[in-house]
Image (cartoon, rainbow, N blue to C red):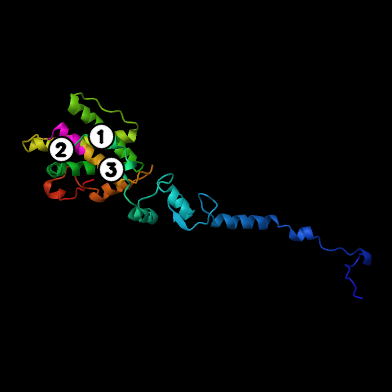
């Protein structure tokens, strides 16, 4: 008959089996290691799904679903993010029912002839907006479009009734954008006076501003933190280009919304 080994000093009938509960129970270190491994592999946003891509907005790795759902919604995505660029390439234009018809100022008619005759003004406005966005990287498409829309309302009132009343702006950032636009318009008129002509009317300014509003709505993704319109503006000019564009510099870069 096989004999049970008994540790020295214990009577043969008192041998003890190892405590199975101690064998099965994980140690604190093992639990910590498992949680640490799980944390290192999970999305930095949802902490549930597996991370698969680096997100520069959170400086961590996230899952594709959070990337798609939170992109330019809760995340301030930098323009050079490859996933943002890829999404823009495959993004379809927004359907008309996503636009507020009144926000596009449909009562203001803009002919192709106007865009040709006022190409330099439109390019100047494009530069002014790009300059404002370059100075304040916290600006997004909504800020620019809101500023332009407020200025459109003010100029429309001025054209229709002669009243000079500026539509209130909601933030310091929007005031900065409006200042850039006003300085551009002042400079444009000064150039005209130096050339012996004063042809820029308030109705022309209104049409130019409405043109930029429609361009903005056509270029933005519509998400709260979208900068697609701003990135489009940046692409039109080198940073050091003059705000008042000469005929030779303007070329034919105006893109009709």
Give the residue displayed 21% in from the left and 30% down from the top. 156
Q: Position of residue 63 (x, y in %)?
A: 48, 55
> In the rendered image, which quarter contains the N terminus?
bottom right
Q: Is residue 20 above or below residue 200?
A: below
Return the residue at label 3: 216
For residue 108, side relative to residue 140 (left or right): left
Residue 206 on the magenta segment: yes
Return the residue at label 1: 179
Element on which disc 1 rests: helix
> In the rendered image, which quarter contains the C terminus?
top left
Give the residue displayed 38% in from the left and 44% down from the top. 223
Q: Is residue 146 above or below residue 119?
A: above
Q: Position of residue 105 (x, y in %)?
A: 25, 35
Give the residue displayed 18% in from the left and 35% down from the top. 205
- Dot 1, crowdedness within 10 Å: few (<14), some or many (≥20)? some
1 vs 3, front mark: 3
Question: Where are the magenta residues, as a range?
Answer: 200-208
Q: Position of residue 171 (x, y in %)?
A: 35, 32
Give the residue displayed 62% in from the left and 57% down from the top. 34
Element on which disc 3 rests: helix
């Amino acid at each position: 008959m096989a004999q049970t080994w008994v540790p020295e000093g214990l009577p043969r009938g008192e041998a003890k089996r190892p405590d199975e509960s101690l064998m099965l129970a994980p140690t604190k270190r093992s639990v910590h290691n498992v949680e640490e491994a799980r944390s290192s592999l999970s999305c930095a946003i949802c902490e549930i799904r597996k991370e698969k891509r680096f997100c520069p907005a959170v400086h961590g790795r996230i899952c594709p679903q959070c990337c798609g759902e939170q992109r330019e919604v809760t995340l301030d995505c930098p323009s050079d993010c490859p996933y943002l660029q890829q999404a823009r390439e495959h993004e379809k234009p927004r359907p008309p029912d996503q636009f507020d018809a009144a926000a596009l100022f449909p009562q203001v008619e803009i002919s192709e002839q106007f865009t040709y005759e006022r190409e330099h003004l439109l390019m100047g406005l494009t530069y002014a907006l790009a300059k404002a966005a370059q100075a304040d990287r916290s600006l997004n498409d909504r800020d620019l479009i809101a500023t332009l829309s407020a200025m459109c309302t003010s100029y429309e009132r001025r054209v229709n009734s002669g009243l000079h009343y500026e539509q209130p702006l909601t933030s310091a950032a929007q005031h900065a954008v409006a200042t850039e636009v006003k300085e551009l318009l002042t400079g444009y008129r000064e150039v005209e006076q130096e050339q012996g002509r004063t042809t820029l009317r308030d109705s022309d300014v209104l049409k130019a501003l409405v043109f930029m509003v429609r361009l903005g709505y056509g270029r933005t993704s519509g998400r709260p933190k979208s900068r697609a319109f701003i990135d489009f503006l940046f692409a039109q000019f080198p940073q050091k280009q003059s705000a008042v564009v000469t005929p030779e510099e303007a070329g034919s870069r105006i893109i009709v919304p």
